[in-house]
Each structure stands twice: as C-alpha cells, then as structure tokens.
Amino acid sequence: MKDHIEPSETKSFDLHAHMVNAVGEIKHYTVIFVLKDKRVGSGIFVNTCGYDGVLTAYHVATPVLEDTEFGLCVAEHPHGLFVKSENCQHVPMGLAQKRRQGEDGPDLSFIVI
C-alpha cells in the first residue's frame, strides 16, 4: 500500500485501509496511565533529544504526576507495570500552565521516564 496519494487519486482513496494500517502501528507506541482513583489517560511513547518518555496532554500529566505512583498499560495482555512519580520529570510544552478556560493553545506535556 502506498503511503501517500496524488490529487488525481482522491476519488479512489481507501481511507479505511489506511486507518486499519495506522491503528496497527500506533498501538505499539500507545500508553494508558491508570491512577489510584481509577481515572485513566493516554499518551504516546516518544524519544526526543535523547530522552525517553510519554507525550500526553497537560491536563493528563498533572494528576498522573501528583500521585506517588501510577500504572502504565503498555501491552494488550494483562500485566502490572507501576512507576513512581519521583522517577519522572514533567516538561510542559507551550503555554499550558497559563491557559485560561476556553483559551486556544497547546495542552501538551512530555513526561520524561
């Protein structure tokens, strides 16, 4: 399957096939945070500038790192992976900390693990 389409090919473009392919790849990089109070959040594993971590929303990273420990769901089979927050570093991205209700702008954070 090609990874791009030409403008002349848009009528025959099979979006479903590309979505199935994307989901098959994305699941290898997706993480689910599980908090003690049963809330969950999600993110994507990334490596940038030599740091490994999770790119997630600021509003997810904040409660995750306020807990002393959180669970990470990183596979499709049952498992127990727990991380101590003290071993992570929160890197807010953009103006997330200064946002007001309804204001446009980034809501991103990088959690260095």
Image (cartoon, rainbow, N blue to C red):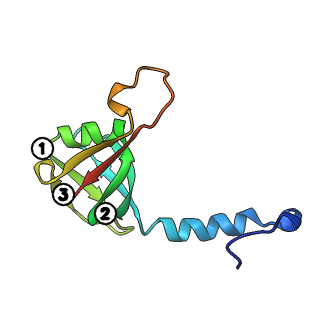
Residue 23, by quadrant, is bottom right
Label 2: which residue? 49
Percent coordinates x, y for residue 22 in the rendering: 58, 67
Left/right of residue 13 with respect to residue 113 in the rendered view: right
- Residue 82, labelled with which disc? 3
Where is residue 79? Give x, y as percent: 26, 66
Residue 92: image x %, image y %?
31, 41
* Label whose residue precedes the other's in the sequence (2 or 3): 2
Q: Secondary structure at mark 2?
A: loop
Q: Amino acid at mark 3?
A: Phe
- Examine the rendered structure and indicate whether residue 100 appears above or below residue 73: above
Q: Amino acid at mark 2?
A: Cys
Relative side of 24 to 16, left or right: left
Badge 1 marks a residue whose secondary structure is: loop
Q: Earlier in the sequence, mark 1 or mark 2?
A: 2
Residue ID for mark 1: 68
Give the spatial CA distance, label 2 vs label 3. Answer: 25 Å
Q: CA distance from mark 1 to mark 3?
A: 10 Å
Q: Residues within 10 Å of mark 3 (few under 14, many from 20)?
A: few
Q: Marks 1 and 2, how far apart in space?
A: 26 Å
Q: Secondary structure at mark 3?
A: strand
Give the class, few, some or many, for how many residues have Cα within 10 Å of label 1's Cα (few <14, many ≥20): few
Q: In the drawing, does residue 112 fall left or right of residue 95?
A: left
